[in-house]
């Protein structure tokens, strides 16, 4: 199974610069791994105002469970939202915070 190397800050920088692609093969493997996490507890976006404002959800602990809105988290662009979720998943999966904003 593909493991995320926390030293590969270059992949995080690549994602930040082009969150919607195209992505290198290595970044795509990393994204596939991040996006294949089990559903319970996974982050997801909630559209609040179409094409203008998004919120953050955490999926329910059990299949079919109610998702929880992460209070106080709002995004003004899809790119900002994707980058924040990437950073959150990175920290959960590597135990390390990304050093870039």
Image (cartoon, rainbow, N blue to C red):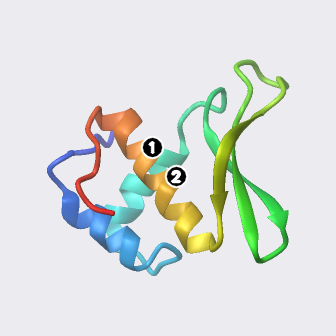
Tell me if 98 is positioned left or right of 60 in this view: left
Please say if the residues under marks 2 and 1 sit with CB atoms less than 8 Å apart.
yes
34 above or below 65?
Answer: below
The quarter of the image holding the N terminus is top left
Q: Residues within 10 Å of mark 2 (few under 14, many from 20)?
A: some
- Percent x, y of residue 91: 36, 39
Residue 93 quadrant:
top left
Q: Is residue 33 visible?
A: no
29 vs 61, nearest the viewer = 61
Tell me if 46 is positioned left or right of 91 in this view: right
Name which residue lies at 29% across and 36% down. Answer: 94
2 above or below 65?
Answer: below
- Residue 85, disc: 2
Kind of element beneath mark 1: helix
Residue of label 1:
89
72 above or below 12?
Answer: above
């Amino acid at each position: 199974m593909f493991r995320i190397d926390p030293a590969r800050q270059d992949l995080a920088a690549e994602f930040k610069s082009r969150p919607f692609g195209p992505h290198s093969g290595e970044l795509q493997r990393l994204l596939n791994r991040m996006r294949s996490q089990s559903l319970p507890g996974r982050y997801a976006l909630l559209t609040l105002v179409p094409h203008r404002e998004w919120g953050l959800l955490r999926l329910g602990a059990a299949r079919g469970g109610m998702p929880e809105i992460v209070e106080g988290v709002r995004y003004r662009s899809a790119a900002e939202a994707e980058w924040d979720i990437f950073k959150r998943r990175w920290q959960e999966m590597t135990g390390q915070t990304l050093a870039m904003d």
